[in-house]
Amino acid sequence: MILNRIFTWLSVLLLAGPGVAWAYPMLGELVQEDSTVALVAGGDVMLGSWAQQVVLDSGFAYPFVRLLPQLSQADIVFANLEAPFGDSGEALVEKSYTFQVMPALAAALVAGKINLVSLANNHIMDFGISHLKKTVQLLDSLGIQHAGAGVNRIEACREAALEVKGIRLALVAYSLTFPQEFWATDTSAGTCFPWAPEVFEQVRSLRRRYDVVMVSCHWGQELMELPKKYQIELAHRLIDAGADIILGHHPHVVQGIEVYQGRLIAYSLGNFVFGSYSEKAREGLLLKVVWSKNGMEWAQVMPINVYNAEREFQPVLLNGERRTAFLQHLNQISLELNNQHRVITSDGRVRFNPKFQQYPEESKQTDYQQEG
């Protein structure tokens, strides 16, 4: 009860004042009293376009409020920030879709407990370096850590570093999407493209310096449920180099989950809150992962309804028959990635190599044993 009062008081204080910039490690300490770190990762967030006026009319808490019970339990809440903050300017290059979001709507990220984002995507540079700089400054002022884009390649590829309860975590974010003009160079701003062998050398270096190495990848084909061959090959090489988890996005739909060498690959988490009315983007995933000093303890997928014709930019957990059907479908599209074994249980838990701890109630006699 005392802890709940402290948490409520601190949350109100942080949302009201500039101290929010330094709040998140303390919030994490209040959420998890043990020695583990909990991550909840979502997919694409773009609060502009059709979503913008809805959020302005409904309040900054509106987009994520139905998921706060899940998001508030995490030390780290991750998303792919799919648009820069700004309200004017000319597009950098001609594209079918260009996005920008009113800076005031950054408050919705804070209300949704999001404290770590990837900027490595095909929209963050839609309005050039001025909007990128504005976005970075705004995120910094709110205490939201970020990786994946910067004024040059060194900055774009630099990791976001976190320490929670003595556990050191790093996130690097890569974009494998076009236009190529958005890729940062030594002298120009943009996103971090994962050139080989540099990318693997970076991950190996992070492995030596951090307890947990997270890699975010913006990749794949939009609206396709199966990852492409290059996604699988890159994910495997990143894990071989030392990554603990791969968090994928860009397709706007959920792609399969793979357990590889005892590590987790989410090829696409789908949409989180995205300002479109796509008929095909109906489900997304929240992925919860818990680490200790000994490594990954357990993971669970939480399907969400992101179909905006129903939800109007306010996702909610799937339940009942729809949740059951989606988890069965997720297992189906993950079979080929896992030697025809089911890696998702009926309650969303992820089956790992036996050397990794499972939920206490999970039987060790599972139908999936990952080799290696």
Image (cartoon, helix red, strand yellow):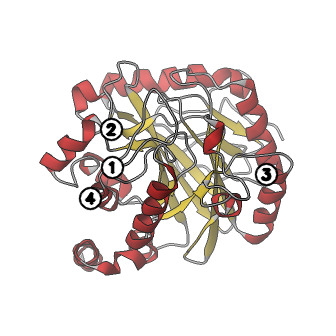
Q: Identify the mark nearer the N-term, 3 or 1.
A: 1
Where residue 17 sits: x, y (%)? 26, 79
Mark toward the viewer: 3 or 1: 1
Where residue 46 sits: x, y (%)? 38, 43
Q: Residue furthest left?
A: 57
**Residue beneath label 4, please?**
104
Mark toward the viewer: 3 or 4: 4
Q: Are marks 3 and 2 in contact (CB under 8 Å)?
A: no
Q: Amino acid at mark 4?
A: Ala
Residue 41 position (above or below residue 31): above
Q: Are marks 3 and 4 in contact (CB under 8 Å)?
A: no
Crowd class of label 2 (few under 14; some 14 to 19; many from 20; radius 10 Å) = some
Q: Amino acid at mark 1?
A: Ser
Q: Residue furthest front?
A: 90
**Residue beneath label 1, please?**
88
Q: In this view of the protein, can residue 278 be seen by the observer?
A: yes
Q: Secondary structure at mark 1?
A: loop
Q: CA distance from mark 3 to mark 1?
A: 35 Å
The residue sitting at 26% across, 39% down in the picture is 51
Q: Amino acid at mark 2?
A: Leu
Q: Relative to the observer, which residue lies in front, 25 or 303? A: 25
Q: Identify the mark nearer the N-term, 1 or 2.
A: 1
Q: Which mark is residue 317?
A: 2
Q: Amino acid at mark 3?
A: Val
Q: Identify the mark nearer the N-term, 4 or 1.
A: 1
Crowd class of label 1 (few under 14; some 14 to 19; many from 20; radius 10 Å) = few
Q: Secondary structure at mark 3?
A: helix
Q: Which mark is residue 199?
A: 3
Q: Identify the mark nearer the N-term, 3 or 2.
A: 3
Q: CA distance from mark 3 to mark 2?
A: 35 Å
Q: CA distance from mark 4 to mark 1?
A: 14 Å
Q: In this view of the protein, can residue 115 be seen by the observer?
A: no
